Image: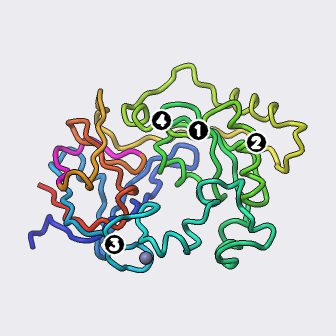
Amino acid sequence: MAENSWNGYLTKMETENVGSEYDVVPKYFLSLNGVRLEMNQFIGKHVSVEYAGQIKCIKCGRITKKSFGQGYCYPCFISVPETEECVLRPELCKAQLGIARDMEYATNHCLIDHFVYLAWSGGVKVGVTRFHQVPTRWIDQGATHAVKLCRTKNRYSAGLVEVELKKIMSDKTPWQAMLKGVEDENLNLLFEKDKALEYINGKSLEYIPETNGLYRITYPVNEYPVKVKSHSFDKESVFSGILMGIKGQYLILESGTVLNIRKHSGYIVTVKVE
Ligand SMILES: [Zn+2]
């Protein structure tokens, strides 16, 4: 096999912050079959990712026709703690009541401090993250600005704060705007934070407000596309072109075609760089 060709199944890209605490600059890594590829160096080069037609469950390793919950076979999807309902909907967490698919997992993932945050990722959104996932969580979403709103003692309490704030703001990432690099010159996240804290005040929620600290995240993107089109390996097996940048969990090609690496977790591929 050529030196610039790698095989393996996709998993979420990992990042390292090569900036500072509040001025975050992510360096991306894609692991394939034990090789950790630094992806930033491929920007400006011709990259191809070819799907081999098989999906390997990222939990148990069995080959599955369809991926459930971004990389799991169906039996794993309905049983492992990584795909429990509260992953997507923290307010449904029952770990604080001693109920979970795996209590040991829940103790480490749900019964720990969480942050409710506000971020700009093509629009303002509210979200919840485990305390040690800052700034990883924001990088994964392609946020360019973020601020912690408050700290809670578990996932459930953070979920309740989020549910309340969803009444006045979105909890979704507008991925197309995010990938086109849409910014708002008038954005003032600290002002949004004050508004949000005022809104949840007196609603008998359990949280500790966070002190002000604005995070800025700068992505390795040479140029943002005017139009974006999401590539699906279920429809087309080859994703290839000049890599213009990486943002969130997406590879962005010159053509505006983007590949969500995380969404294709478990997909067996060959990556080539010319
Ligand atoms: Zn499995």
Residue 83 spot, x, y in % from top left: 55, 65
Instruction: Give me the C-alpha separation between circle 2 and circle 3.
Output: 46 Å
Q: Nearer the viewer, residue 143 or 239?
A: 239
User: How far is the residue under mark 1 from the one under mark 3?
Assistant: 35 Å
Which residue lies at the image location 39% right of the left edge and 55% below the top edge?
Answer: 263
Query: What is the three-letter code of the residue carrying label 4?
Result: Pro
Q: State whether residue 174 is above or below residue 247.
A: above
- Which one is earlier in the sequence, the residue at label 2 or at label 3? 3
Q: Earlier in the sequence, mark 4 or mark 3?
A: 3
In the image, is 6 to the left or to the right of 1?
A: right
Disc 2 vs disc 4: which is toward the camera? 4
Question: Is residue 45 placed above or below 106 in the rendered structure?
Answer: above
Q: Are marks 2 and 4 in contact (CB under 8 Å)?
A: no
Q: Badge 1 is on which residue?
A: 119
Mark before the other along the chain sequence, 1 or 4 = 1
N-terminal label among 2 and 4? 4
Closer to the camera: disc 2 or disc 3? 3
Q: Which mark is residue 211?
A: 2
Q: Nearer the viewer, mark 4 or mark 3?
A: 3
Q: Residues within 10 Å of mark 4 (few under 14, many from 20)?
A: some
Q: Which residues are magenta?
A: 238-247
Question: How far is the residue under mark 2 from the one under mark 1?
Answer: 16 Å
Q: Is mark 2 within 8 Å of ligand 1?
A: no
- Could you tell me the amino acid type at mark 2? Thr
Q: Which residue is mark 3?
A: 64
Q: Is residue 245 magenta?
A: yes
Query: Is residue 153 left or right of 84 when viewed as pictured?
Result: right
